[in-house]
């Protein structure tokens, strides 16, 4: 896979380090273009990503990527299957969970959505916010229930946008 930065292939870094045959050392005046190289734990400072970097995006509306997401098993011991910017899920009781963010949101005015699948077969269910708590910058408390009572879902997903 080729990484494109500023519309070009490869990345240019300062070069000229002692004992480094590749020459990629930050803090010197020479430069080297890295093409088809693997970077371990790279950090981009203030990256500028717009619709030009998203091949399937059309139009000029701003892009607001997902800030956090999680797919978890809510039955028995809660287990995260996969996630992004989610540290853990707190099990507060039957069908009641707190999604804890790795990096806090800028404020609690984010939008979120959720879906679930239960072990029950005949009822409609959904994930909603707990009425006794409000979202915070570091966590979102959600509940899963059918029309009758709270239940633990076998599949639950929550996404957060800001």
Image (cartoon, rainbow, N blue to C red):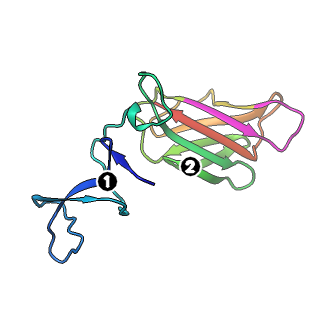
Number of numbered discs: 2
Q: Can residue 18 be seen in this view?
A: yes
Q: Callout 1: 10 Å neighbours few (<14), some, many (20+)? A: some
Q: Which of 23 and 142 is in front in this view?
A: 23
Q: Distance between the residues labelled 1 and 2?
A: 29 Å
* Residue located farthest toward the right when viewing the structure as drawn: 122
**Which quadrant of the structure image shows residue 36?**
bottom left
Q: Are marks 1 and 2 in contact (CB under 8 Å)?
A: no
Give the residue at mark 2: 83
Q: Give the range drawn in magenta.
A: 112-125
**Circle 1: element type:** loop
As for residue 93 lying within the magenta part, the answer is: no
- Direction from residue 142 to residue 123 in the image, left or right: right
Q: In this view, does 37 lie above or below 19?
A: above
Query: Label 1 belongs to which residue?
Result: 10
Q: Which label sits in the foreground, 1 or 2?
A: 1
The picture places residue 124, in percent across and down from the top left corner, at: 82, 30
Residue 92, x across and y down, in percent = 65, 44
């Amino acid at each position: 896979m080729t990484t494109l930065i500023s519309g070009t292939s490869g990345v240019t870094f300062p070069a000229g380090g002692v004992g480094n045959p590749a020459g990629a050392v930050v803090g010197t005046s020479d430069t080297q273009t890295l093409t088809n190289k693997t970077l371990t734990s790279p950090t981009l400072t203030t990256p500028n990503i717009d619709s030009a970097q998203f091949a399937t995006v059309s139009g000029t509306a701003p892009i607001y990527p997902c800030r956090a997401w999680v797919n978890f098993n809510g039955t028995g011991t809660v287990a995260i299957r996969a996630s992004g910017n989610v540290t853990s899920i707190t099990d507060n009781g039957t069908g009641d969970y707190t999604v804890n963010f790795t990096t806090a949101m800028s404020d609690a005015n984010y939008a979120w959505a959720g879906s679930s699948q239960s072990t029950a077969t005949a009822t409609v269910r959904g994930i909603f916010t707990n009425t006794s708590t409000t979202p915070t910058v570091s966590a979102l408390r959600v509940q899963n229930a059918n029309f009758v009572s709270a239940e633990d879902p076998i599949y639950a997903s929550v996404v957060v946008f800001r």
